[in-house]
Amino acid sequence: IVRYMNLQDFDHTAWNFLTGRAAVGRNANLRWIQVSWGSRLTKAFLDLDLHQPGSDSELLGIYFPIGRQHIDHQTLQLHRAPHCRSDLLFNGALKDRARSVYMGVIKVLPGAQKTDAYQRNGNLILDSRARADSIPGLEIEADDVRCTHGATAAQVEDEYVFYLMARGLSRPQAERMIVQGFFQAVLDRVPVESVVAKLERVIERKIGG
């Protein structure tokens, strides 16, 4: 069992290029958390290689670009062995003129029967000038698998804000609660409470600008 987190919070003038690869062996369990807060530009290549039977992996991501930040993640879930599972969830919020790009592929080779793979990328647009591009993909060469993927990009719904304001919250408080709830799906899967608290503080800072 391995739990690994990579958190980057570079100055917004930095250019960050990252390559990460995990080879997951027989009956091994991996939870990998990628957090991208900083940099002017980040380009991250993140690969999961499930090469022996029974391997199980999660790849979780959080990003929150603001200003003119550009955050770009490219992921690969490579299933080479049978009876393996991979689960990917990347959620990001964007403010100002920020941009995010997500491109992900689940690739299942011919011998990887009984594969169970999932990939989801969600984006919450907090400013009309922000832009999120999401390109999930499947390459399936086995015939007994369960593989699904999805992507969303949406603005904060006015009806949700109205609902919370009708119960006494101000608009900034209502929007803050919605953004925090959006990230909660990932935070709930971070195994260390002190790390979750730190991430929540940065999210609060980003929301406040």
Image: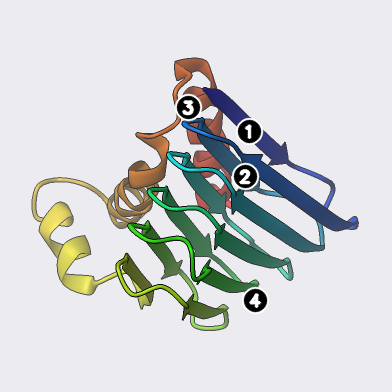
Relative to the observer, which residue lies in front, 23 or 93?
Answer: 23
Picture disc at residue 97: 4
Dot placed on the residue nearer the N-terminal end, 3 or 4: 4
* CA separation in Å, label 2 and label 3: 11 Å
Q: Nearer the viewer, mark 3 or mark 4?
A: 3
* Residue underneath mark 2: 35
Position in image of residue 38 (x %, y %): 74, 50
Residues under numbered marks 1 and 2 in contact, where contact means CB atoms less than 8 Å apart:
yes
The residue lying at 37 percent from left, 58 percent from top is 115
Amino acid type for the residue under numbered disc 1:
Met
- In whole angstroms, how far apart are the C-alphas of marks 2 and 4? 20 Å
Q: Secondary structure at mark 3?
A: helix
Q: Which residue is labeled 3 in the image?
A: 196
Q: CA distance from mark 1 to mark 4?
A: 27 Å
Which is nearer the N-term, disc 2 or disc 3? 2
Q: Nearer the viewer, mark 1 or mark 2?
A: 1
Mark linked to residue 5: 1
Query: What separation in Å lies between label 1 and label 2 (alpha carbons)?
Result: 8 Å
Identify residue type, mark 3: Val
